[in-house]
Amino acid sequence: MRLPKSISPNPLFITTIEIRFLSSLTKAELLQKMVLAFSDEFTNLEQSKIPEELKQQEKKFKYAADYMLSNDDYILSFATNSISFEHSSEYKYWETYSTFIKKSLEKIFKLGFIEKIERCGVRYGSILDGLTDPSIALIDLPKLEINGLQSEFGGFQSVFKTDTSNLFLQITPNAKISKQHEERRGLYIDIDSSYSKELEPNQEVFDIIDKLHKDQKELFFGLLKEEFVVKNLNPQY
C-alpha cells in the first residue's frame, strides 16, 4: 500500500506514544530524575489531579501520569510505570516526531530506572471535521440484519493483528472530541497499536514503535475510500 507522507487538512487529534515498564523508583525519585534530565527542553511542569488511591483501585488509571512536562510543541507525561509523548501543537509528522521520541527515550534509558518494558503503544485519533455521513469516507459500513430489521451504523470496534501488533480500532460517527481548549466534531477514527512482549530498554524499542506507527497508518488509510482521500485530504507522496 502506498501511504502519503502528509495530508491536508490533517485530521489527527490524538498522537500518543507510550511505553509501560517495571521500575523500583518512588514518585519523588522519578520526578527529580526527569526534571534534571529535561528542564532544558520543557519549561512547564504540572502534577496530575488523579489521586494515588484511585490509581491503585481502578485498573483504567493504573498507568495514568503523575506529572506532565510540556513546551510549545510536546507534552512528556510520566509515572513510575509509564512514559508517554504527545503533541501540544500541530502534528509535526512522523519523521520529526519519531526523532524527538527517540532522542528523549535514549536520554531516559540512560537514567537507568527502567528494568523491563512491558508494552509499547502508538495511539492516533483522527477526526474528519463536519463529516456526518460515514459512507462518504469509509470503504464499508458493518451491517447486521435480524428478523428483517436492518441495522444503522452507530459505531464500530474491532481488533486486528499483524505479526507484531495488536490494533484496536474504534470508529464513532458524529463524535464530539475535546482536548485542552479545543473541540471538534465529525467522524472519529481511533487506532491503538500495541506490542505487549517484554523488551529491554534499547534500540529494539525504537524499531517496535516505528513498526506500530506503520501498522496503524496502513489500517487508517485502508479504511478510507481512495477517491475521498484524493478529493478531501490532498495527499502528498
Image (spheres, rainbow, N blue to C red):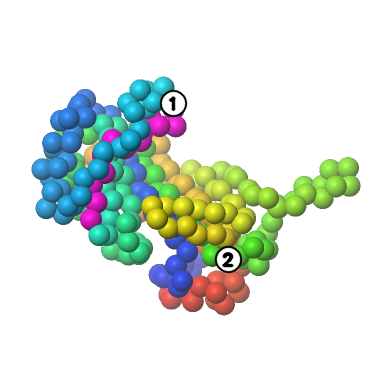
**Is residue 101 visible in this depiction of the protein?**
no
**Circle 2 sits in a helix, a strand or a loop, which is it?**
loop
Horizontal and vertical percent for residue 57?
41, 22
Bounds of the magenta segment: 59-71
Residue at (22, 34) in percent of width and height = 114
**Is residue 44 visible in this depiction of the protein?**
yes
Asked if residue 63 is among those painted magenta in the image, a careful observer would answer yes
> Which amino acid lies under the numbered mark 2 shown in the image of this protein?
Gly
Residue at (20, 26) in percent of width and height = 26
Horizontal and vertical percent for residue 172?
60, 52
How many other residues sit within 10 Å of disc 1, few (<14), some (14-19) or many (≥20)? few
Left or right for 154, reference 78? right
Where is 230 relative to 22, above or below?
below
Q: Nearer the viewer, residue 91 or 19?
A: 91
> Which amino acid lies under the numbered mark 1 shown in the image of this protein?
Glu
Left or right for 72, reference 213? left
Q: Quadrant of residue 214?
A: bottom left
Q: Which of the labelled discs sits on residue 58, or is there none?
A: 1
Tag 2 residue: 130
**Circle 1 sits in a helix, a strand or a loop, which is it?**
loop
Compute the Cα span from label 2 to label 1.
35 Å
**Extreme residue toward the front, this view:** 181
